[in-house]
Image: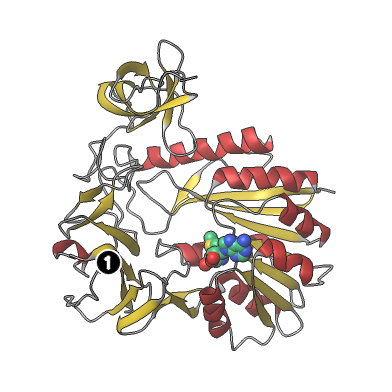
Amino acid sequence: MQTEPVPSLVGREYEVEVGPVAHGGHCVARTDGGQVLFVRHALPGERVVARVTEGEEGARFLRADAVRVLTASKDRVEAPCPYAGPGRCGGCDWQHAAPGAQRRLKAAVVAEQLARLAGLTPDEAGWDGTVAPAPGDKVAKGEVPAWRTRVQYAIDAEGRAGLRRHRSHDVEVIDHCMIAAPEVSELGVETRTWPDMATVEAIAATGSHDRQVILTPRPGGRLPIVALDRPVSVQRIGERDKAVHRVHGRPFVRERAAGRTWRVGDGGFWQVHPKAADLLVEAVMQGLMPRKGDMALDLYCGVGLFAGALAERVGERGAVLGVESSRRAVEDARHNLQDLDRVRIEQGKVEQVLPRTGISEVDLVVLDPPRAGAGHPTVRHLAGLAPRRIAYVACDPAALARDLAWFAEEGYRPVTLRAFDLFPMTHHVECVAILAPAK
Ligand SMILES: C[S@@+](CC[C@H](N)C(=O)[O-])C[C@H]1O[C@@H](n2cnc3c(N)ncnc32)[C@H](O)[C@@H]1O
């Protein structure tokens, strides 16, 4: 039996009242017929014409862009970036919101996720309900902090650099990204052509003069001849094997944070905002209050940032075990922390490594998982180790809230929660929750 195709609603326009902001940065609205719309480029309380970008009749929800604002929110500003707006660059989704409003929207999302997925009010989570700007970021209306120390440019068919459009492979060609750090813009990726490249990533390390450009050729692309305006390290990722070939310079950058230098190789995780690493280490250490002789875990440790800060505090009698799945990051972590005898780094997935360590008790845990969160088995295992405190660093408030619900089941509750705006002009937010036994 043949089924009728469901009619697409792409391109259909609806005049709607815009409701609250949701996880993912869009606002929620409803059509007269009751269908839910996730609207980008809108703000809560506005009346807009929303044009559907994805979805069909009867779908659980439709995605849409606000293409005309009929009644504007007082939080609306003219987008400072010429590439922002419906159908344009997918990088910044909140260029049209005043900086203070962006942080209030992020706070609303965190509060909603905590309530819905963990059953916690801000008070119960030990949170003052605010999102703090990163130190030194411009926060006045119309000002844009240039915070991105790592930018991955997509290259179009004509070899021009740009950024991807929202939920699309199309490239919005740009001549300047306003949120890119000046040291990234100075690399000149946007001002030259890259005929055989699929992506070009530009990295400007914080606190050192290291710069790196990582080239990923199109299938069959030539080994590029790279003549950038300044000497930088250039890598080329092999098309088939994903192996990295050094074209020029070093295969890593050195970042400075928490009083140490960190080697970070290609593809290795490092916080993008230049103030983030220091800020998060400070928040984690303030919350954990490590003591001499403590045994600590740094899970999802990357190149060893929190393990290093912990090791210096737990001293000779203490010990730190870091766990990280990326082989390259583990090599870097071991290199970065080689002067600290009491640190060990295990390579593998946290959920697999933890059960086989044989450790039955720890004092402190740092947990900094990717967007998916840690998950119930890891949370259960950690609670079984009876730590005095756990610091959970979260780039996704939904994953944090889900894991907090598991922690509650296992007898741990948040004592403090802080939220930071480490991704201005976008909907992303970073949280640090400190957990302790509920008693
Ligand atoms: C958000 S980063 C945190 C890195 C580090 N804590 C930092 O601040 O620089 C998450 C890290 O977890 C690693 N990772 C992802 N899934 C993992 C897993 N299942 N087990 C262990 N590490 C994992 C990633 O390679 C990445 O380095």
Q: Residue at x 75, y 79 (%)?
A: 318
Point out the residue furthest to the top here.
32
Residue in view at x 40 percent, y 21 percent: 5
Rendered image quadrant of residue 363: bottom right
Indicate the quadrant of ligand 1 in the picture.
bottom right
Amino acid tagged 1: Val
Task: Please state the horizontal and vertical placement of residue 425, each as a whole percent of the image.
Answer: 34, 46
Residue situated in front as seen by the camera: 276 or 289: 276
Q: Give the colour scheme of this rendering.
A: secondary structure
Name which residue lies at 35% across and 64% down.
150
| Residue on which disc 1 sits | 184
Up the image or down, 94 lies above or below 334; here it is above
**133 on left or right of 209:** right
Relative horizontal placement of residue 61, taking residue 367 as reference (left or right): left
| Percent of width and height locating residue 312 | 63, 79
Q: What secondary structure is found at the residue carrying circle 1?
A: helix
Q: Is residue 345 rendered to the left or right of residue 237?
A: right
Asked if disc 1 is less than 8 Å from ligand 1, the answer is no
Task: Give the image quarter of residue 273.
Answer: bottom left
In this rendering, does residue 29 appear at all? Answer: yes
| Residue at the (65%, 50%) spot, across then down | 416
For label 1, the crowd category at 10 Å Cα-Cα, with few meaning under 14, some 14 to 19 and many 20 or more, is: many
Where residue 163 appears, x then y in whole percent? 27, 52
Q: Point out residue 6 in the picture as x, y percentages from the top left corner.
A: 41, 20
Residue 374 versus residue 323 in the image, above or below: above
Q: Quadrant of residue 14?
A: top left
The residue nearer to you, when weighing 77 against 237, is 237
Which residue is at the front of the view, 272 or 193? 193
- Residue furthest to the front in view is 1
Q: In the rendered image of this protein, does residue 166 appear above or below residue 185? A: above
Q: How many marks?
A: 1
**Residue 282 shows in this picture:** no
